[in-house]
Every structure is written in structure tokens, then in C-alpha cells.
Image: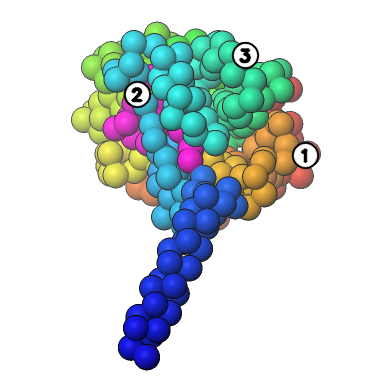
């Protein structure tokens, strides 16, 4: 009797182990793997790369995915990093930033059965999904704040590299300033770099000496130098991409929020739930909750100024104001 009992137990255990093994081999139970090639400045940029990474951390914690990443300092080129992520058999491979487009397309052509997600640029390749943002819309609101609150009637814009994406930030900012204050002067300068905080600080210093009392940087880590110099000089600045108030709590009035983390999380969520992403092209603005501005701090808007800002935001969302025209 005892012998039969032991045999039954062994049989049951074997059946359980076999079922577990089969579950692990079942593609439906396989954990989704995501790979990301971060933007040029890499982790710690307090902007674009950190947002992309945060979106995948949230997906890992809430959707039970796994993810791996590469930074340019770890690989000779973006292309090499993307190749490594393909070799790891990631289900979805993300390229972060417009500067990566050419190399991502090279790899995507080489591996037509792999799926890629390009953030901040558009590719026509069939295996590349695109996410872009209407940066000009939230930049317009930042410009309106600067235009309403400037005391000197001089404000500034600092760009990183001069390209179509950063021009959207600049144009939106200038239009917002001029909408509420046509007489204001807008100083603009491009640093030619996204990762030089000292250069950003020196450009900000030049603008402040020219009476700019509000400066809006769209320049990655170079912009951090702008923000810190604004605080040192006792003037005002704005953050970009994420809420950068904590960087300089006496200078950062608000930030242009580019919801890269949410966009990546939502794309990954759709992939986990359906095994694909439903659209090839996503263009996210205020209406789509892709861009916004952070809470206004340090300064106070009058009730009339608050109403003006809210009306501008509503008009952008409903299409009454089209910033990119």
C-alpha cells in the first residue's frame, strides 16, 4: 500500500513539473522583452533619456516585462547598440531621439522581421513605428508665460543642435511670447550641443547681460547650465521635457512637459496586451496628452493672466489655434 502511495506521489509531481515546463515553453506565457537605445546624452540627462528609461521601469513594474538598454558610451555607435538589442531577441526595440533615425533604419532594413519604435522622428520603413510630439504647442504656453511676466521686455531661447525638432520648440515659444506681448524682444541662440552645461551657462550669461529676464532652453544637459546660471543671476528660466523645478527652485517657473515616458509605456502596454502596436504613426500634442506644462511656481499669475493661459491651452486643444502654421 505504502509503495503504491509513493508511486502516486511521484506521478503527480512529474505531472506538475511537466505542466510547468510546458507553460514556460508556451509563447503566450513568455515575458515580453524590450530593448532601448538611449539618446546621446544618456542616463542622468534629467530629460529625454531619463524619461524613456522611466517609462520602461513603469512597464517592468506594472506589466511584468523585462528590458535592457544601451548608451552611446557603451557602444561605438548607435547602430552597434541596436544590433546588440536585436541579437538579444527583444520583441520591440526602441530608438530614442531623432538623431538615431539613420542608424535605426539601417538596422531595421537588415532585420525586417524585427519591430522597432522610433521616438521623435518618422520613418517610412514598414517595421518601424513612429512616435512624435507637438513640442511647439506646450512651448507656445511657456512663451505666453514669459511674455506676460517679463519686466525687461527681453526674453531668451537657447537651443541645443539646430534641427527641425528644436526649431519647433523655438517657433512655438516665440509665437507664444508675441501672442500676449507683441513688443517683447526674443533673443535666440543655438549651442550646437546637448551635453555641455558650461556652454549653456555662458550663453545664458550673455542673454542676461542683454536684459533677458526669462530664458527657455531646449538643449538637454546644455539647458541645465542655462537653468543654473539663471538662478545664480537671480533671473527666471523654464525646464524642458520633464519637470525640472528641483534643479533650481529659485529660477524654474514651469517646464514644458514632453510625455516620452507615458508614450513609451502606452506603446509597450499595447504590445503586451495584443502582441502589436495598433498604429504606425503617433503624433501627440496637448489634445492627446502628449505635451503639457508643469505647475507654475515662484511667480504669481493674476486672475486675468491665468484665464489668458487657460484660454490659449483650450484653443490649441480644440484647434482654434494652430501653432505650427
Residue at 34% from the left image edge and 24% from the top image edge: 71
Residue 184 screen position, x and y as percent: 53, 23
The residue carrying pointer 1 sits among few (fewer than 14), some (14 to 19) or many (20 or more) residues within 10 Å by Cα, namely few
Q: Nearer the viewer, residue 126 or 226?
A: 126
Residue 30 placed where, x, y %?
52, 49
Q: CA distance from mark 3 to mark 2?
A: 22 Å
Disc assigned to residue 71: 2
User: Where is mark 3, residue-wise?
Assistant: 109
Tell me, yes or no, whether the two marked residues, 1 and 2, touch with CB atoms within 8 Å: no
The secondary element bearing badge 3 is classed as: helix
Q: Quadrant of the C terminus?
A: top right
Mark 3 or mark 2: name the one nearer the start of the chain: 2
Q: Which residue is mark 1?
A: 319
In the image, 265 versus 306, the foreground residue is 265
> Residue at coordinates 73% horizontally, 37% vertically from top-left?
279
Quarter of the rendering occupied by the N terminus: bottom left
Tell us which disc is closer to us: 3 or 2.
Answer: 3
Q: Residue at x 65, y 45 (%)?
A: 275
Q: Is residue 204 above or below residue 213?
A: above
Q: Which numbered disc flags the more N-terminal residue, 3 or 1?
A: 3
* Element under disc 1: loop
The colour scheme of the drawn protein is rainbow
First-in-chain label (1 vs 2)? 2
Q: Is 314 above or below relative to 42?
A: below
Q: CA distance from mark 3 to mark 1?
A: 37 Å
Instruction: Give the residues in magenta.
Output: 33-51
Residue 253, percent from left and from top: 39, 41
Amino acid at each position: 500500500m505504502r509503495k503504491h502511495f509513493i508511486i502516486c506521489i511521484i506521478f503527480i509531481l512529474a505531472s506538475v513539473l511537466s505542466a510547468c515546463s510546458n507553460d514556460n515553453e508556451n509563447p503566450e506565457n513568455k515575458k515580453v522583452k524590450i530593448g532601448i537605445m538611449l539618446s546621446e546624452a544618456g542616463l542622468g540627462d534629467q530629460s529625454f533619456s531619463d524619461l524613456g528609461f522611466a517609462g520602461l521601469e513603469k512597464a517592468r513594474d506594472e506589466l511584468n516585462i523585462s528590458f535592457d538598454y544601451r548608451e552611446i558610451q557603451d557602444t561605438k555607435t548607435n547602430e552597434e547598440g541596436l544590433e546588440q538589442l536585436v541579437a538579444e531577441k527583444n520583441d520591440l526595440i526602441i530608438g530614442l531621439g531623432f538623431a538615431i533615425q539613420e542608424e535605426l533604419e539601417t538596422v531595421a532594413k537588415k532585420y525586417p522581421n524585427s519591430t522597432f519604435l522610433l521616438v521623435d522622428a518618422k520613418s517610412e520603413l514598414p517595421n518601424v513605428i513612429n512616435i512624435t510630439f507637438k513640442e511647439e504647442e506646450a512651448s507656445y504656453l511657456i512663451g505666453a508665460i514669459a511674455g506676460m511676466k517679463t519686466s525687461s521686455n527681453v526674453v531668451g531661447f537657447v537651443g541645443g543642435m539646430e534641427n527641425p525638432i528644436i526649431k519647433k520648440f523655438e517657433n512655438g515659444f516665440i509665437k507664444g511670447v508675441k501672442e500676449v506681448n507683441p513688443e517683447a524682444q526674443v533673443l535666440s541662440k543655438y549651442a550646437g550641443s546637448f551635453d555641455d552645461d558650461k556652454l549653456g551657462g555662458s550663453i545664458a550669461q550673455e542673454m542676461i547681460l542683454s536684459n533677458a529676464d526669462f530664458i527657455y532652453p531646449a538643449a538637454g544637459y546644455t539647458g541645465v547650465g542655462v537653468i543654473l546660471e539663471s538662478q545664480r543671476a537671480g533671473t527666471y528660466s523654464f525646464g524642458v521635457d520633464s519637470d525640472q523645478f528641483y534643479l533650481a527652485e529659485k529660477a524654474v517657473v514651469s517646464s514644458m512637459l514632453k510625455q516620452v515616458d507615458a508614450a513609451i509605456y502606452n506603446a509597450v502596454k499595447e504590445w503586451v496586451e495584443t502582441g502589436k502596436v495598433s498604429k504606425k504613426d503617433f503624433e501627440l500634442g496637448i489634445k492627446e496628452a502628449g505635451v503639457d506644462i508643469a505647475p507654475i511656481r515662484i511667480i504669481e499669475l493674476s486672475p486675468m493672466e491665468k484665464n489668458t493661459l487657460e484660454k490659449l491651452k483650450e484653443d490649441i486643444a480644440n484647434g482654434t489655434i494652430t501653432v505650427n502654421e
